[in-house]
Image: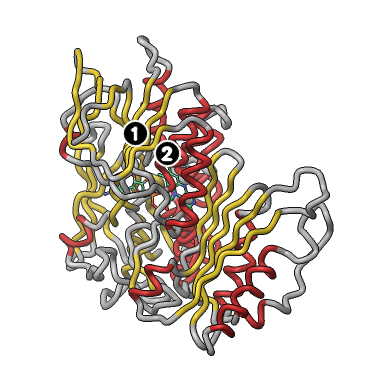
Amino acid sequence: MAQRLIVIGGDAAGMAAASQARRRRDRGDLEIVAFERGHFTSYSACGIPYWISGLVPERDELIARDPATFREKFAVDVRMRHEVTAIDLDRREVVARDLGGGGEVRERFDTLVYATGAVPTKPDWARAGAGGVFGVQTLDDGAALRAWLESEPRPRRAVVVGGGYIGVEMAEALIQRGLSVTLVEQAEQPMSTVDPDMAELVTDAMRAIGITIRTGLAVTGLEETDGRVSAVVTAEGPIPTDLVVLGLGVRPNTALAEAAGLPLGVTGGVRVDRRMRVAGVPGVWAAGDCVETVHRVTGMPVHVPLGTHANKQGRVAGINIGGGYATFLGVIGTAVTKVCDLEVGRTGLRERDARAAGFEFVSVIAQSTNRAGYYPGSRPMTVKLIAEKPSGRLLGAQIVGWSEAAKRIDTLAVALWNGMTVDDMTALDLGYAPPYAPVWDPVLIAARKAVDALTATDR
Ligand SMILES: Cc1cc2nc3c(=O)[nH]c(=O)nc-3n(C[C@H](O)[C@H](O)[C@H](O)COP(=O)(O)OP(=O)(O)OC[C@H]3O[C@@H](n4cnc5c(N)ncnc54)[C@H](O)[C@@H]3O)c2cc1C
């Protein structure tokens, strides 16, 4: 008799696991059932800001594989609009509710993949039900926001609450749609994923495209007129608006896991081993935004909800379930984003992370350009490196600049992943031609500067 795999969550992690398991085990050997409470499978939430801005015209362009493809090509029994409401580990069953009104089903499993993603932070004031308040977690959220933008009376003003990368991307998207946008951030600066000196460059770029930035300020409530939001309330007075977008971060979606007795880690994510097996629970796997992982530089548990990890972790789980061998070795915090043409990349530790982890370090900032100075289109590029003292091991890097800045972080990510020192990095054989870099690449200039700083501290 075929074994039975049940997947909870039909996006990046869950469907990567399902498709990898299927590649290794045919339907006579493994039956796969996937429950998804939403309307879509394998969609790119990452693309939502570009759909909102209009750069990506159609919603369906954000869908990598629809349920029909999974059914036909991967023989996965995809149950859309089915929310799993309980996991019974003793009976090896899940209970799911048909959100289309079809009642409840119980399904047996031999193997379970828990891939429920994350829950966006939604303060009480955002729950009150005023029209015009949106998250951007799912394609349904994106569709609701787009419909509001196209409804009458046409919204002209927007407030984005939260200045993380999603808030920044959404602020840009709304500016591109011609709205007047205010970004409200409780901390002293938006883009706290990089150090304040680098975040300042991003803040300047945001202001330059017309985004009003209010920092050190919290939204505490909403004002509404005729059921529509008309202002956000702050300690410095109301900010009038026709719509509010929430970008306040997420936490692992573990309510079901917790109720079933799956172990959670200190960050709140499900605890898994390198093969994505849930710690101490045979036959149960977890992947994606719902799990905790390890930071390779500090060795500490972290929750880093990114699509890049969700896809890899799902793949690892699926390969292992399929009878292969794969591991997920942790993260180093690499991420990229942009504000219009200004690109931002980071990897490893920020100064405050390095300090909190007890490292002694130097940090340097090198100013350079993305191309040879004389080549048309040459623009500034700022590279920051953080290197351990006295070893010189690279601990972290950040880049802000125009074209070719963001993906340059990958060079630094590879160096950091492999434990390179800044001394080693000065000898790297990196590509050079005037259209792509100055003769000394910004990465090499920064590495040399870090070596100088280490030498000056009597390493
Ligand atoms: C606006 C935005 C921009 C982003 N940009 C980037 C980016 O540029 N780069 C990057 O790496 N990451 C980005 N991300 C993050 C990325 O989208 C997530 O990390 C990724 O989607 C996580 O995949 P997942 O499968 O773990 O979770 P999800 O994508 O959240 O999928 C989980 C699925 O489980 C379903 N589900 C949950 N509970 C149940 C249940 N009880 N029963 C049935 N179904 C259930 C949900 O409906 C959901 O479809 C962005 C996210 C957003 C919102």
Q: Nearer the viewer, mark 1 or mark 2?
A: 1
Percent position (x, y) of residue 216?
A: 28, 45
Q: CB of residue at label 2: within 8 Å of ligand 1?
A: yes
For label 2, the residue is: 40
Residue located at (43% from left, 56% from top): 196
Q: Is residue 284 above or below residue 454?
A: above
Task: Determine which of the numbered discs, if any, sits on residue 245 in the image.
Answer: 1
| Tag of residue 220 | none
What is the C-alpha distance between the residues marked 1 and 2? Answer: 22 Å
Q: Which of 160 and 185 is in front in this view?
A: 185
Name of the residue lying farthest toward the front:
456
Q: In which quarter of the image is the N terminus?
A: bottom left
Residue 30 at x, y = what percent? Answer: 43, 62
Quadrant of the image occupied by residue 444: bottom right
Examine the image and state in which quarter residue 342 appears: top right
Name the secondary structure under disc 2: loop
For disc 2, the neighbor class at 10 Å (few under 14, some 14 to 19, many from 20) is: many
Q: Nearer the viewer, residue 326 or 19?
A: 326
Is residue 126 something one can see in this rendering?
no
Q: Where is residue 250 in the image (x, y as percent from the top left)?
A: 31, 51
- Left or right: residue 106 versus residue 152 is left
Q: In the image shown, does 248 or 381 lie closer to the viewer?
A: 381
Label 1 CA crowd tier, 10 Å (few <14, some 14–19, many 20+): many
What kind of residue is marked 1? Val
Identify which residue is drawn at 41% across, 20% down: 149
- Mark 2 is on which residue type? Phe
326, 339: nearer the viewer: 339
Of callouts 1 and 2, which one flags the residue occurring earlier in the amino acid sequence? 2
Residue 223 is left or right of residue 250, and the answer is left
Per the image, label 1 sits on a secondary structure element best described as strand
